[in-house]
Image: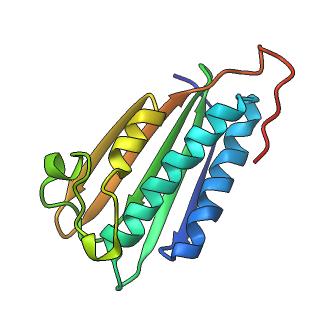
Amino acid sequence: MEVTNYFTLTIPAYSRNESFARVVVAAFAAQLDPTLEEINEVKTAVSEAVTNAIIHGYGEKGGEIVITCTLRADNTLEVIIKDTGVGIEDLEQAREPLFTTRPDLERSGMGFTVMEEFMDSVSVDSKPGQGTVVTMTKKLSTGEQGGHETNL
């Protein structure tokens, strides 16, 4: 499918950058004039993916998160969140609701479940010791309903 626009952003894996990442992706997606609900769903999914990279991918050691967003001609947004952290030992287990590797931080273990609920597709590629790539897509409406606002 033809790409109409894209960006790549690299941020340090600091908790304070999670909100920045979600707003940047939302602002980018706003080009298509999606509904407020769609923007909120994208923001929440991005927040979960970035938070997973920060907390589970890097923990205390820190690193970088690379976010790549693409808009396609069919109004599909693709968001890729990549880290080079510890990776995921058991991907199937990690995707189970309520599973967390950080119960000490009172994590709910719902990150992948939330991403899957709010996006049309979520794929995860992870190699222990090498990092994780989360690819999410969502087909957005294009303002054809008219009159709605997208407050970021």
Residue 146 at what x, y percent from top left?
83, 17
Horizontal side of residue 88 vs 7, given as left or right: left
- Most foreground residue, 151 or 13: 151
Residue 88, image quadrant: bottom left
Residue placed furthest toward the top? 144
Asked whether residue 5 is in view, the answer is no
Q: How many marks?
A: 0
Give the percent coordinates (x, y) of residue 67: 51, 56
Q: Is residue 22 left or right of residue 148?
A: left
Q: Nearer the viewer, residue 40 or 132?
A: 40
Task: Name, please, the residue furthest toward the right.
Answer: 147
Give the quarter of the image for residue 135. top left
Residue at horizontal 71 percent and vertical 28 percent from the top: 35
Question: Can you say whether 44 is above or below 59 in the image?
Answer: above
Visual colour scheme? rainbow
**Whether residue 114 is situated above or below residue 100 in the rendered picture:** above
Q: Is residue 97 left or right of residue 62?
A: left
Rendered residue at 16%/64% (across/down): 128
Residue positioned 36% across, 37% down in the render: 122
What x and y, as percent, mark residue 150?
A: 78, 37
Name the residue located 32 percent from the left edge and 69 percent from the top edge.
57
Residue in front for this viewpoint, 4 or 82: 82
Query: Residue 92 location, x and y as percent?
Result: 15, 46
Quadrant of the image occupied by residue 115: top left
Seen in the image, is 118 located left or right of residue 4? left
Pick whichever, 108 or 133, lies toward us: 108
Q: Is residue 143 visible?
A: yes
